[in-house]
Amino acid sequence: MTDPLAPSAPATAGASAWVTVDAAAIRDNVAELVRRAAPAQVMAVVKGDAYGHGIVTAARAALAGGAAWLGVAQLQEALALRAAGVEAPLLTWIFPPQADLGAALDAGIEVTVGSAWSLRSAVAAARERGQAARVQAKVDTGLGRGGVLTDWEEFTLELARAVAEGSVELTGTWSHLAWADAPEHPTVRAQQERFAAAVDALRRVGLDPGLRHLANSAATLTTPAAHLDLVRPGLAVYGLSPVPDLGTPADFGLREAMRVTARLTQVKRARAGQGVSYGHEYTTPRDTVLGLVPMGYADGIPRHAGNAGPVQVGGRRYMVAGRVCMDQVVLDLGPDFDGAPGDEVTLLGRGADGEPTAQDWAEAAGTINYEIVTRMAPRAPRVVVGDER
Ligand SMILES: *Cc1c(COP(=O)(O)O)cnc(C)c1O
């Protein structure tokens, strides 16, 4: 095997299925994003267990590739990174009013304040610790999700008071795009303009906005005007294209970091007319050979991919036959199949040798590549290859 994503046998001995993560690919993807974004800095987004790739592995590889920052959604994810010994600058943007922002402060985690209550929580934690909280202000410039939407002027005044009393230090100001994957969409320009106006409003009350950031993967790759001081790519870090209609990963100088492999657990003859899997939504059209792949929706294989999900066996592409079960899928391997139980099958990879990609699965399941990799469940062990472990 020449595929660098094919791990050595001992790492997977006895496993039914596993997820190989190429840390060198993550490192190199980040290096490419750093090159594209310069002089803006790169915050590698490692939320959602690094889109299924493993948060600590991905964080270390991203830092090796030149990421200056790491970004996570939940405060718990940030604390987990610190507990694993990751010391890089770290920003979180999701926590409830009950969260312990004192713990964030102690761990040197920067918190996003995107509402009056979150700013007050940060101020309260800072007063209690007798130490300024490093915060980044989030303005909703049109996504209609997180951040201050209608009360920005009022918010800037409260923020200015908190900075003046020394309870917070404003290190950044940011927002998120609604249509970054459609670079020509008028909202992309409009959100940049609203963001600039929000930054001006901060300056009018005497605040330095700190690092200004707006760009996710799609904007990092397609809208240089939105790079500002820092970009926040997630998907591209893992070598997937956020704009599959505009370019493949290779077109953007990226390579996929995940491969999903399983071993056939049964290979058996079946007669024509045999119903396959729950509800018999597939019936063998002729005498054939059925193969069992020990991955199902408990492992993150989308149930929507029944009769559609692609799997490569012995260099050939097959489609899942019938429904995806919790623990397995069935393949109709054809009458001449000469493989055996224990043979490796590839559910997704880079596609270089004809294996299905995350994008192929996304199309088969009616979803996006983001969801395919992120939902890969922990039951399949992660095997890290590449030089950054
Ligand atoms: C997830 C996320 C990102 C990364 O988005 P990608 O499309 O994966 O690059 C950036 N910023 C915020 C606020 C996010 O939630």
Image (spheres, rainbow, N blue to C red):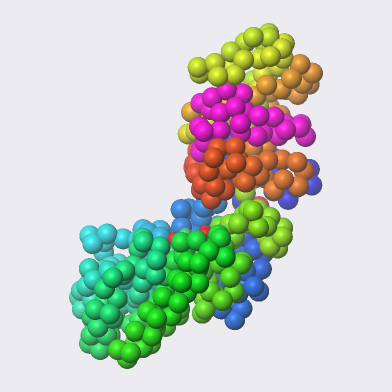
Q: Is 316 included in the stretch rendered in magenta?
A: yes
Q: In this view, does 375 lie above or below 203?
A: above
Identify the residue at horizontal 53%, vertical 50% (top origin): 370
Picture quadrant where residue 143 is located: bottom left
Q: Position of residue 321 (x, y in %)?
A: 61, 23
As displayed, is residue 327 above or below residue 171? above
**Does 329 lie within the magenta span?**
no
Magenta stretch: give its range: 299-325
185 over 360 or under it: above or below:
below
Task: Confirm whether residue 111 shows in the render.
Answer: no
Quadrant showing the N terminus: top right
Q: Is residue 311 left or right of residue 326?
A: right
Query: Residue 130 in the image: x percent, y percent?
Result: 23, 81
> Left or right of 337: which side holds 65?
left
Quadrant for residue 13, please give it. top right
Residue placed at 64% from the left, 42% from the top? Answer: 360
Determine which quarter of the picture holds residue 320. top right
- Which residue occupies the extreme front position in the image? 186
Q: Nearer the viewer, residue 204 or 340?
A: 204
Q: Can residue 385 be seen in this view?
A: yes
Q: At 51% across and 33% down in the image, what residue appears?
A: 304
- Residue 23: percent from the left, percent from the top? 63, 57
Q: Which of these two is toward me, 168 or 189?
A: 189
